[in-house]
Amino acid sequence: MSVLKFFPRVGQIAFAGWVAVIAGLASAQDLTLQEPMWTDPVDAPDVLPVQVSVGKSMRVRDNLGEIGRPFYRDTLYFVTNDKKRPKAMIARRVTGSAMPVEDLPESLQGVFRSPAMRDGRRVPSEVRSILIYNPESAARKGNSATPRLLRVVPPRFPAERDAGGRDKLVVEAQLEIGADGAVTNVVWPESLGAAFVRLGLRAVSQWEFAPARSGGQPVAGAVTVPVIFQRTFGTEGEGKYIPPKLAKSARPVYPTFMRRAGVEGRVKVAFEVTVEGRTANVYPVESNNPNFEDAAVDAVSKWTFEPAQVDGRPVRVRMGVPVIFNIQGGGSSMYRVKRPKSFPDTLPEVFHFDEPPEVLNVASPVYPLSALREDREGKVKVGFYIGPDGYVEKSAIATSGGADLDGATIAAVEKLRFKPAIKDGKPSYAALRMEFEFKASGHGDVQVDHQTKRLLRLLETDREQLLSLAELDEVPEPVSRQPPVYPRSLGAAQANGTALIEFVIDRRGFARLPRVVSASDPAFGYAAVQAVASWRFQAPRRDGKLVDAIARIPVEFKRE
């Protein structure tokens, strides 16, 4: 088994532009993290989860120029009821601006000291955390200032019939702020629906501002703020909420080749609990080894619950759990970063670290169908750096294996997530490199299993065996659809995009051999293929018999 390694060297990567990005740290701008809030409309518990204090851990990186208006980021967390250090998983994050923000790392934002409490008992909870950005023009001190955003009340999301099929929306609102800091008027885009206007006005009128200043005195002012509407995963309607209770669990099956290699793993899985207590739409959110993802999804798919209730009525809710794969006596992680004895002279000081980053989420590239058909192989070396938030901020190919292998590699690297490196006791930057060997035999670093080879032969020699969706007894329903990752390689140049992906649904319901039919940008195509390769569906059937089928699905990308 080939084990991928991370190297703290960068080969042929140029760093001048990267350092310029990092150097633009602006202390006059600032971030404020609100106390967690219970997601509306579920009634609040007696005690909310207590989030750790982050103090001065947050900074703003301004590499696009000064943004002269406030904005905020709205994050939904699922928080477990563990007594100490309850686990938190991000359900969704929406930012009201495209500006890159360097703030406290995920490992801090998602840390809670204690769980929610109701009737003296620890309970799981869904909370939202608001991170507010204020520009230099809204500084706390000085004779002149624009209105400073202090507190956000998130607007409720309209009912399904008024939402137009959306579950999130960001709109620009023009706010007039009085000399007392109160919102006196709100101007919404003309195209915004009446339900959004009504619920938005109800929330925004409760926002708190420090008023504008002129000559050191408070005055009326105006400001434009992106307002975020997003549907929470909690239940709709008011009333007493009882979370789902696990009734029956299934232990995950440890992948044999991982056990033999002494490799351990961890997978965070998201899923819905239906009103019948079954799990639905189970998919991996994060894993430190993709070889464990199928086993984790298989296990959670078999779980049953006593469904969540509101006022005694069963309701559908969304949850998340970590699935841990441990070996008795201890094992090792397949992916790791080691600190070198010394850093090369060519590596800028900003990338030196005391403690190496730890891998939290990793993905293997998807072998491009074009290369498989040509029996084309190659090795790709990619350099990248990760920021203090643990995400890959920039990547570049050091050794090319061809355009399609390179694109597949970049799409996988952009899914990486780390517990950030530490320098002088604080989260820091790190420059790393990975190597992926593509071998059509499947003996390289990129998976090509028996089923993939079987379907490839059908595509080449007996395509009639692959049925269209119209030829099936019914169109297979999706079982697990992990959302795609927006390509960071596009920067801020392009906002939204689409890709049309063709793929095979095999007899077990796994999506295989995805290929790009069309894409508004090649990066969207590779990112969509990376996502679709992890999807699962109900097994396709014709006349009741299991078959293989070909499907086409459009994948949309929206910058949040």
Image (cartoon, rainbow, N blue to C red):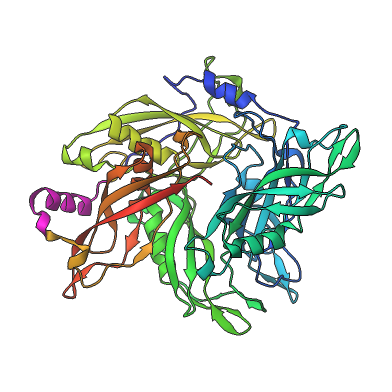
State which quadrant residue 464 falls in.
bottom left
Q: Is residue 251 visible?
A: no
Q: Is residue 276 left or right of residue 374?
A: right
State which quadrant residue 62 falls in.
top right
Please identify the quadrant where the N terminus is shown: top left
Q: Position of residue 481 (x, y in %)?
A: 39, 58
Above/below status of 312 relative to 204:
below
Between 84 and 440, the one nearer to me in the picture: 440
Above/below status of 42 relative to 60:
below
For image coordinates 49% across by 79% down, the residue present is 275
**Is 451 within the magenta?**
yes
Q: Is residue 104 left or right of residue 412?
A: right
Between 429 and 97, the one nearer to me in the picture: 97
Above/below status of 83 relative to 400:
below
**Is 321 within the magenta?**
no
Q: Position of residue 461 (x, y in %)?
A: 8, 50
Outermost residue toward the top in this view = 345
Q: Is residue 53 left or right of residue 409?
A: right
* Range shown magenta: 448-464
Q: Position of residue 356 (x, y in %)?
A: 56, 34
Outermost residue toward the left in this view = 461
Q: Is residue 112 left or right of residue 408?
A: right
Q: Position of residue 160 (x, y in %)?
A: 52, 69
**Number of numbered labels in the structure image:** 0
Of helix, strand and loop, which mostly describes the magenta segment? Answer: helix
Q: Is residue 142 visible?
A: yes
Above/below status of 343 relative to 53:
above
For image coordinates 66% across by 39% down, the residue present is 103
Outermost residue toward the bottom in this view = 312
For image coordinates 66% across by 34% down, the residue present is 67
